[in-house]
Amino acid sequence: MTSTKASPVIAVYGATGHTGGYLLEELRRRDLAPILVGRDADRIRAAADAVDLPGADVRVADLTDHAALVTGFTGADVVISSLPAYVEHGSAVLAAAIEAGAHYTDMSGEQLFLKRVFDEFGPRAAAAGVTVVSGITDSNLPGDLLAHLTTRRVTGPAEVVLSHLSNSGGNGSKGSAETVFASLDWFRGGGWHYADGELRTGATARHDKITFPGHTEPTAVAKFPQPPVLTIPRHSEVSYVEGVLATSILDTLSGFTAELIDALPDAPSADLRYDLVVDAFGADGHRVRGVLSGVDSYRDSALMAVETAVRLSEGAAAPGALAAAEAFDATDFLDALAPFGITWRIEETDRAGDRA
């Protein structure tokens, strides 16, 4: 007698945006009929029709209506939240997913929201028997997984530096700009870094120059609030973790105003190739570098979120709020991205920082 495994039921909140479209395309590619939840049924159906996704279960729920959100997520194995500015809007979807008994993931990129996920919602998720893996983006997921792999190749405790490098010079979406603007002071101040067992603030980066893959000269960088600063110490022996970004990009982000954001196009540039770089320095000075090279920051984040949701539906991860490397095997997950043109590698170096 042959048994067949039922396809996971995945609910999506925020399917009508730019990244939401990539989520729907990937769900269609996997032959998954999702539950689509949002404020406007007509817009949701139009988004589903745009990617030829028939049979989607459309449910209406506003972020301010907790009961409707819970009803909307009832019956789902996993909820994917796709929103701008999670620090303002994200808690409503997460709280409802937990109450509905669904595992949860999102594409947030905000340290402040992730801290709340672990501190406030982690215990609630554990009590409900569901798993929450927040912050699945082209930076956060590979940053966490590559740190797990690289820190184990150096003598601990390791010092870890993460950076995201745009290889196209293109602009992001209006939603990304809204996310930064919602926590503008936090982004300007550099957010948290991890040092000596605790999260600390302070605008000065320990590493102010990085020679990126394919570059011969170092790039000036400054501290940036990368969410893996919070997740990496959960699973790896580290003394210090910081996120940095090219100062040229940070200068642009710091100049955001409400008027400027209103004038931005909804969609980002067409060319959004990038490298996510993780440098792990051992206590003896030896450095190991992990690099993930991607095709499109928004598409890739959506692909990673769907892969996360499918894996969560299998129920193998422990309940509660987890880092990606706590929930999944790092190598296996990164390898699963190869069919989409997303590649990764580990570079061993000597103590001077040159490739061995």
Image (cartoon, helix red, strand yellow):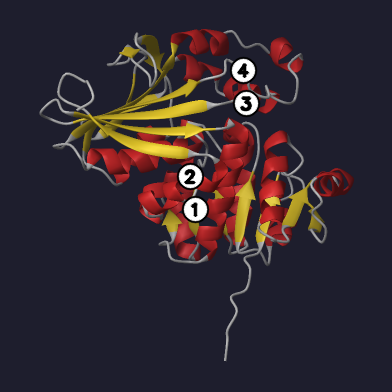
User: What residue type is disc 3 on?
Assistant: Ser
| Viewer-closest of 74 and 18 | 18
Q: Earlier in the sequence, mark 3 or mark 2?
A: 2
| Residue contact at pointers 3 and 2, CB within 8 angstroms | no
Q: Earlier in the sequence, mark 4 or mark 2?
A: 2
Calculate the distance from the C-alpha at mark 4 to the C-alpha at mark 3.
13 Å
Question: In the image, which disc is placed on residue 117?
Answer: 2
| Percent of width and height locating residue 178 | 65, 24
| Viewer-nearest residue: 95 or 9 | 9
Reading the image, the residue beneath label 4 is: 170
> Do the CB atoms of the residues marked 4 and 3 lie less than 8 Å apart?
no
Residue 233: in sight, yes or no? no
Q: Around disc 4, counting alpha carbons within 10 Å, would you say few (fewer than 14), some (14 to 19), or many (20 or more)?
A: few
Nearest to viewer (mark 4 / mark 2)? 4
Name the amino acid, label 1: Val
Residue 29 horizontal side relative to residue 1, left or right: right
> Under tag 4, what secondary structure?
loop
Query: Is mark 1 in CB contact (under 8 Å) with mark 2?
Result: yes
Tag 3 residue: 176
* Residue at image point 72% right, 54% down: 28
Residue topped by disc 1 = 132
